């Protein structure tokens, strides 16, 4: 009898903890949404003094170029190797260009560039804002009557949002070049077929525009998560490190989940025939 | 004519959560032009009081009038307008680490005053000259010693010629020379700007050298106030313990703990 009572108590404790976790997560999501709304409403400074945003595009975008371009090249080269291996069994090796281009433009470009962007630039944004908070730089700014969300957070947010589609486009372009290097130069697929089939099959609206929309959505998600986690970080060394980790984990999950939703909306229903 | 006090706090109470008050029944009035010290042990609520004066926290009960306005009635815009007339020196300076000394001091001017570059340059150099660091203008904050960083932060906080200066533990962690420099600067800047200064500190002996009036706080209340000489002569046991730095007194040396013998697992018998 006593055991049963203990068991019931135990179950109730777990249920309570679950409830607490859920309600605190919902509360946090609401807080993050209000934060985003406030941020967008106070973006005047970031847009009026565009040099502030340009500096952040440099940090988030230009400094991410190396990792994005090298990764793009290798992903494209691997795609060509794997793609050729499968396509030649069906005698369709000339379609290699199509396979490489569509995979990159529709999926791998936005998704892999997004994941790299989250770990390269997103984590840096979180750590920077978190450390500014821990060393009272954010408080100092408030005491100087300067709104830190307008002055510090908004330029970083817009810098990320603007950089992300450009990085994804460069990733795809570099990947196609990698596919060309391996497919045409190394394996010997006909260069004319490689490019002309690609040109015929890749559609501006259905493929390229959808890819750009995806990367823009990922850019908003990663930039939002990064600045929020930084601003909400517990202002200690441990708090900032946890926030940085959360940025990378949440951003990556958000990118993959959003990708599924967007793909389902964009590429189903035979609109792409 | 007697001018109204620049900071006036009446029956103020404050708590981060309603059940536990950090400040209770605080009354103080700070006269224009004076240098005032708020002193007490760590955790007595003095930094919280400073943040209430700065408008970062609002009173739970009572009223805080700063620069003539009750802080509780200000919206964000009004609060920022009030803070433009205020300067605050943070404990460790809080310099922007991605900007040079020059850019740090120029920051409030760039944000609030649309002035041409050559005038900006002159103003920044003027402020840096006042703290003796004109020669360090192009250094980055990481290249400065603790004392220098605090002087740069001081130059930054006076950039807009504030009427009210707030100092949060300005003496912590300074060597004797930097310390002397900061003490001198606080007084000089106060008098030359015609400002009022509030210093929150636990370095009592040192602060008593520079202030006109001192308030002593313990457990969220003001327990003594007066001129430095009044404080030095005070019979209040807590103030005596603090001013003379005695280990034993109303503030016990030991944090509340269970019986020592029991902790060491020494059997009583």
Image (cartoon, coloured by chain):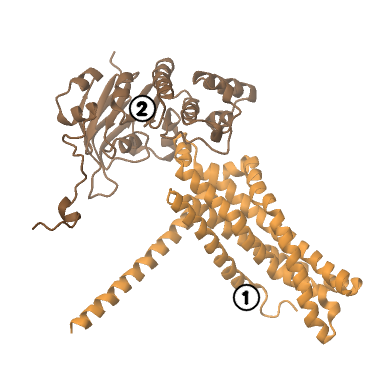
The secondary structure type at the circle numbered 2 is loop
Q: Residue at x 48, y 30 (%)?
A: B153
Q: Is residue B205 above or below residue A246?
A: above
Q: Residue at x 50, y 43 (%)?
A: A132
Q: Residue at x 20, y 28 (%)?
A: B239
Q: In the rendered view, does B15 fall on the left or right side of B146? A: left
Which chain is rendered brown in the image? B
Q: Which of B191/A165 is in front?
A: B191
Residue A195 seen in this snapshot: no
Q: In the rendered view, does A250 fall on the left or right side of A89? A: left
Q: Which of B93/A219 is in front?
A: B93
Q: x, y percentage for residue A149?
A: 51, 45
The secondary structure type at the circle numbered 1 is helix
Q: Residue at x 60, y 25 (%)?
A: B115
Q: Chain of mark 1?
A: A
Q: Which of B247/A46 is in front?
A: B247
Q: Is residue A172 above or below residue A229?
A: below
Q: Quadrant of residue A18?
A: bottom left
Q: x, y percentage for residue A45?
A: 58, 41
Which residue is the site of mark 1? A264
Which residue is the site of mark 2? B67
Q: Is residue B14 above or below residue B140?
A: below
């Amino acid at each position: 009898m006593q055991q049963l009572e203990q068991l019931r108590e135990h179950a109730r404790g777990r249920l309570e903890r679950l409830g607490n976790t859920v309600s605190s997560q919902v509360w946090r999501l609401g807080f993050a949404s209000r934060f985003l709304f406030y941020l967008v409403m106070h973006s005047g400074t970031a847009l009026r003094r565009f040099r502030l945003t340009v500096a952040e595009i440099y940090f988030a975008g230009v400094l991410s170029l190396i990792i994005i371009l090298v990764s793009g090249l290798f992903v494209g080269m691997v795609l060509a190797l794997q793609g050729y291996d499968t396509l030649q069994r069906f005698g369709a090796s000339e379609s290699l260009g199509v396979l490489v281009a569509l995979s990159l433009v529709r999926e791998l470009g936005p998704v892999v560039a997004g994941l790299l962007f989250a770990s390269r630039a997103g984590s840096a944004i979180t750590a920077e804002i978190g450390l500014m908070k821990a060393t009272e730089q954010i408080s100092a700014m408030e005491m100087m009557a300067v709104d830190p969300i307008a002055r510090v957070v908004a330029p970083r947010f817009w810098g990320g949002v603007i950089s992300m589609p450009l990085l994804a486009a460069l990733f795809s372009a570099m990947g196609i070049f990698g596919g060309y290097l391996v497919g045409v130069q190394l394996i010997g697929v006909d260069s004319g077929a490689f490019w002309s089939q690609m040109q015929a099959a890749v559609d501006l609206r259905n493929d390229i525009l959808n890819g750009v929309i995806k990367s823009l959505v990922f850019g908003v998600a990663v930039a939002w998560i990064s600045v929020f986690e930084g601003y909400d970080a517990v202002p200690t060394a441990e708090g900032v490190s946890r926030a940085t980790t959360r940025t990378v984990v949440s951003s990556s999950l958000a990118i993959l989940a959003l990708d599924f939703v967007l793909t389902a909306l964009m590429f189903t229903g035979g609109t792409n025939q | 004519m007697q001018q109204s006090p620049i900071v006036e706090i009446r029956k103020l109470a404050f708590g981060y959560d309603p059940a536990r008050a950090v400040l209770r029944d605080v009354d103080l009035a700070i006269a224009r032009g004076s240098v005032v010290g708020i002193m007490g042990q760590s955790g007595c609520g003095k930094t919280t009081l400073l943040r209430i004066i700065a408008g970062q926290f609002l009173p739970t009960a009572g009223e805080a009038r700063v620069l003539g306005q009750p802080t509780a009635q200000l919206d964000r815009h009004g609060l920022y307008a009030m803070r433009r007339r205020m300067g605050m020196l943070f404990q460790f300076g809080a310099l922007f680490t991605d900007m040079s000394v020059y850019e740090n001091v120029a920051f409030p001017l760039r944000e609030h005053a649309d002035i041409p570059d050559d005038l900006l340059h002159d103003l920044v150099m003027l402020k840096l000259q006042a703290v003796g660091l004109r020669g360090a203008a192009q250094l980055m904050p990481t290249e400065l010693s603790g004392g220098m960083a605090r002087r740069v932060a001081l130059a930054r906080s006076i950039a807009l010629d504030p009427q009210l200066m707030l100092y949060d533990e300005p003496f912590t962690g300074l060597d004797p020379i930097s310390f002397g420099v900061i003490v001198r600067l606080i007084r000089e800047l106060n008098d030359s700007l015609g400002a009022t200064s509030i210093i929150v500190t636990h370095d009592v002996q040192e602060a008593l050298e520079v202030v006109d009036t001192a308030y002593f706080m313990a457990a969220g209340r003001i327990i003594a106030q007066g001129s430095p000489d009044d404080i030095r002569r005070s019979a209040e046991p807590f103030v005596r313990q603090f001013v003379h730095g005695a280990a034993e007194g109303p503030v016990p040396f030991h944090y509340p703990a269970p019986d020592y013998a029991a902790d060491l697992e020494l059997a009583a018998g």
